[in-house]
Image (cartoon, grey):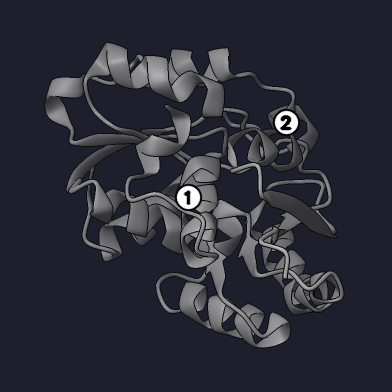
Amino acid sequence: MSDWRRLGAIIPSSNTAVEREFPRYVPEIVSVHASRMPLESVTAEALDSMSDRAVECAELLSHADVHAVAYACTTGSLLHGPGFDRELEDALSAAIGGPAVATALSVDRALERLGAERIAVRTPYNEELNAREREYLEAAGYEVASISGLGIEDNTRIGALTPENAGEQVRTVDPTEVDAVFVSCTNYPTLSAVESLESDLGVPVVTSNGATLWDLCRVAGVGCESPSELFR
């Protein structure tokens, strides 16, 4: 029997970052397969409508016999606050007959694993989504020292950002005031900047894609103990 592991990623239709970033950081025995939900604008209303297609996407990925699946959208998995994220994981798990993770909970698990309590958050989002993200993280028990975004709603524009853009945002954080920095959005290319940012700041830098991929690999049995180990 082959040791090959197939991972599924359920992503917004306009996401162009997950399929670029995930394959670069998985073991050689892992392949990544995506299914898409319709989304063009990153607004609360559009994200809410998009989530209705999640189970259908998981069922399609089950045809590829994936070993685990991720709902790879940050605000889409935290939009309705704590509880919705776990319900989403349960529904996707039932659809594929295997483990599932949702980005919001993956971020929570990564921050918890790193022992972070006080965090700074940087996003590409508008103020409404930033407020919802703050509420979610605070309800999960984190102290949000600061949160700021770029005010972008067009998801193709978010996908056109670079790790250097993420670095510019992260370097506005005073690392002496936080335990970790969280860079939100699975369509924000960030992973190649993580190692250098952690070296410069001296604190962990958790990104949506980094946390999701770490958690997905973990539940599929091909993971590592620390989220930061993926980028070494």
Tell me if 80 is positioned left or right of 24 in this view: left
Q: Position of residue 81 (x, y in %)?
A: 44, 70
Residue at the front extreme, as displayed = 1
Tell me if 152 is positioned left or right of 31 in this view: left
The residue sitting at 62% across, 54% down in the picture is 73
Task: Please state, as top left, top right, bottom left or bottom right, where the C terminus lies in the image.
Answer: top left
Disc 1 crowd, CA 10 A, few/some/many (<14, 14-19, 20+): many
Query: CA separation, marks 1 and 2?
Result: 21 Å
The residue sitting at 21% across, 61% down in the picture is 141
Describe the element under mark 2 as helix, strand or loop: helix
Task: Please state, as top left, top right, bottom left or bottom right, where the N terminus lies in the image.
Answer: bottom right
Q: Quadrant of residue 186?
A: top right
- 25 or 200: nearer the viewer: 25
Q: Relative to residue 179, is residue 63 depicted above or below?
A: below
Q: Earlier in the sequence, mark 1 or mark 2?
A: 2
Tell me if 82 is positioned left or right of 60 in this view: left
The residue sitting at 71% across, 84% down in the picture is 95
Marks counted in the figure total: 2
Any part of residue 66 in sight: yes
Q: Position of residue 104 (x, y in %)?
A: 47, 59
Judge depth for marks 1 and 2 and give the one in front. Answer: 1
Q: Quadrant of residue 58?
A: bottom right
Residue that label 1 marks? 214
Give, as a three-letter code, the residue at label 2.
Gly
Disc 2 crowd, CA 10 A, few/some/many (<14, 14-19, 20+): some
- Label 2 near label 1: C-beta < 8 Å? no
Tell me if 178 is positioned left or right of 181 in this view: left
The residue sitting at 29% across, 32% down in the picture is 204
Describe the element under mark 1 as helix, strand or loop: helix
Q: Relative to residue 188, is residue 113 depicted above or below?
A: below
Q: Relative to residue 36, is residue 119 depicted above or below?
A: above
Residue that label 2 marks? 159
